[in-house]
Image: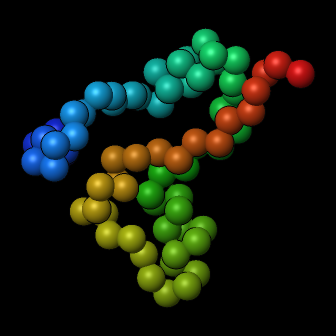
Amino acid sequence: MVMGLAAKVGEPWISLYTEDALVELLAEHGFSVQENKTLDDLNAVYFSPMGRTLAENQIFKLEHFVAATSKKS
């Protein structure tokens, strides 16, 4: 479904990572994951307290929002 939506607007679907694969990819490039947030996390922390949420049918349901730091000092 998402791949079709991307194609519809002329964008190639070039990646899809599992949580473990993303952690490994970032580690290979010298980063350490500090936070990995999903739509449910964002709704609970930011949107629900304001009386609204982002709908699960939005594309954000597929995304993770990751904060990482460099392992290099």
Tell me what residue is drawn at x 44 percent, y 82 percent: 52
Residue at the extreme front of the image, as rendered: 10
Q: Position of residue 39 (x, y in %)?
A: 44, 57
Tell me what residue is drawn at x 55 percent, y 85 percent: 50
Q: Is residue 33 above or below residue 1?
A: above
Q: Is residue 60 above or below residue 17?
A: below
| Rendering quarter of residue 17 | top left
Q: Is residue 35 visible?
A: yes
Q: Position of residue 25 (x, y in %)?
A: 53, 18
Q: Is residue 18 above or below residue 5?
A: above
Tell me what residue is drawn at x 54 percent, y 68 percent: 44
Relative placement, left or right, of 62 versus 67 is left
Relative placement, left or right, of 71 versus 54 is right
Relative placement, left or right, of 60 versus 68 is left
Q: Is residue 1 visible?
A: no
Query: Which image quadrant: the N terminus?
Result: top left
Query: Which image quadrant: the C terminus?
Result: top right
Foreground of the two, 29 or 23: 29
Q: Position of residue 22 (x, y in %)?
A: 50, 26
Residue at the extreme bottom of the image, as rendered: 51
Tell me what residue is drawn at x 60 percent, y 68 percent: 45
Residue at the extreme top of the image, as rendered: 28
Across the whole image, how many numbered discs are drawn on residues?
A: 0
Q: Position of residue 9 (x, y in %)?
A: 16, 49
| Rendering quarter of residue 32 | top right
